[in-house]
């Protein structure tokens, strides 16, 4: 019998509670990491038309698809790096200690090649799964939902990070789906309302697609993305901590001091 068979599913409300507590108690660090994670994607969206112009793409669907895929790759890589940087903060909080921005970020720098490889596999695998009848991509995104935190907090290799994430999410995929659905709907509603409010107050769009470059829309859109990304990163890292606690601690307790020293 698989030892995971008797493990109870996580509670969605508990993960959300831990997410908001992490944001409340470590807001400067959470949003500092979120800023570094969102800025490259925002800049990529702006410079992409200039890079694509020499290709002379006459087909709008092709140009749109290439833009969406490339932006998705950049965003996926940066989000996973952000999760790796924030997980030390989340783990430290769960242990009753404090892990600051620099201490949490150092393991990400040391393991950058591994994390980049994991990020590319993660993004490409999920995209291919979504193209193939959608369901496989959704399943992969759930099973691999904590692969970034695992790779940093447990110092695993590339293959082992995916295996460990899959093992941690066993018997609770439906709950993780509900958690991500709640986070996605809530985050989407926040972004829509924030953009409408920004347009009403400042009279500028904020979707980040204004050409040529316009400072006001860029700053407003960046602020909205910053808040949304901060929540997303905190959600994944809190999910990892809850899964670890459900799993009985795993290697985290033994490795925490060494990894984030």
Image (cartoon, rainbow, N blue to C red):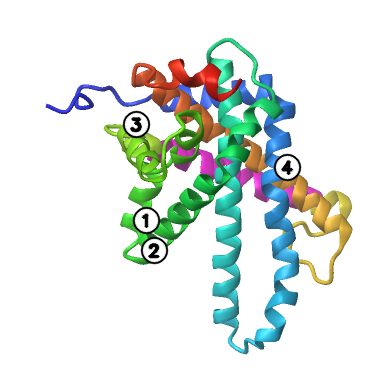
Q: Magenta includes 182?
A: yes
The Cα–Cα distance between marks 2 and 4, rounded to whole angstroms, is 28 Å
Who is closer to the viewer here, 156 or 97? 156
Question: Is tag 4's residue or tag 3's residue first in the polypeptide sequence?
Answer: 4
For residue 193, say whether it is visible.
no
Magenta range = 177-198
Cα distance between the residues tagged 1 and 3: 18 Å
Residue under label 1: 137
Check whether the beta carbons of the residues at disc 1 and disc 3 lie within 8 A of each other. no
- Mark 1–mark 4 Cα distance, whole angstroms, equals 27 Å
Choose the circle earlier in sequence order: 1 or 4: 4
Identity of the residue drawn at 55% across and 52% down: 76
CA gap between label 1 and label 2 equals 7 Å
Q: Secondary structure at mark 1?
A: helix
Residue at x 54%, y 66% (from the top left corner):
69
Residue found 66% across the figure and 50% down from its top: 192
Where 194 falls versus 239 (above or below)? below
In the rendered image, the vertical position of residue 163 relative to residue 45, given as above or below: above
Residue at screen point 11% across, 26% down:
1
Is any part of residue 182 visible from this angle? yes
Residue 165 placement, left or right of 228: left
1 sits left or right of 115 in the view: left
- Residue located beneath label 3 in the image: 168
User: How busy is the neighbourhood of tag 3: few (under 14 within 10 Å), some, or many (20 plus)?
Assistant: many
Check residue 232 for magenta coloring. Answer: no
Q: Which residue is mark 4?
A: 35
Looking at this view, name the residue that lies furthest to the top: 96
Label 4 crowd bin: few (<14), some (14–19), many (20+), radius 10 Å: some
Q: Are marks 3 and 2 in contact (CB under 8 Å)?
A: no
Q: Position of residue 79 (x, y in %)?
A: 58, 46
């Amino acid at each position: 019998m698989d030892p995971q068979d008797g493990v109870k599913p996580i509670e969605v409300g508990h993960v959300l509670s831990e997410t908001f507590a992490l944001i409340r108690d470590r807001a400067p660090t959470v949003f500092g990491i979120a800023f570094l994670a969102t800025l490259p994607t925002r800049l990529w969206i702006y410079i992409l038309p200039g890079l694509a112009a020499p290709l002379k793409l006459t087909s709008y669907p092709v140009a749109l698809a290439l833009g969406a895929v490339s932006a998705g790759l950049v965003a996926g890589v940066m989000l996973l790096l952000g999760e790796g940087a924030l997980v030390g903060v989340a783990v430290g909080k769960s242990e009753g200690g404090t892990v600051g921005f620099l201490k949490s970020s150092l393991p990400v720098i040391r393991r950058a090649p591994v994390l980049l490889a994991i990020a590319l596999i993660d993004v490409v695998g999920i995209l291919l799964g979504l193209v193939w009848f959608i369901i496989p991509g959704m399943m992969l995104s759930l099973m691999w939902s904590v692969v970034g935190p695992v790779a940093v907090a447990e110092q695993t290799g590339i293959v082992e990070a995916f295996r460990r994430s899959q093992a941690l999410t066993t018997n609770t995929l439906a709950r993780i789906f509900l958690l991500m659905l709640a986070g996605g709907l809530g985050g989407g509603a926040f972004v829509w309302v924030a953009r409408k409010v920004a347009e009403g107050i400042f009279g500028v769009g904020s979707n980040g697609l204004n050409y040529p470059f316009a400072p006001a829309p860029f700053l407003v859109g960046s602020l909205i993305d910053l808040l949304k990304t901060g929540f997303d990163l905190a959600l994944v890292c809190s999910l990892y901590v809850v899964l670890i606690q459900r799993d009985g601690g795993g290697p985290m307790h033994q490795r925490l001091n060494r990894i984030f020293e």
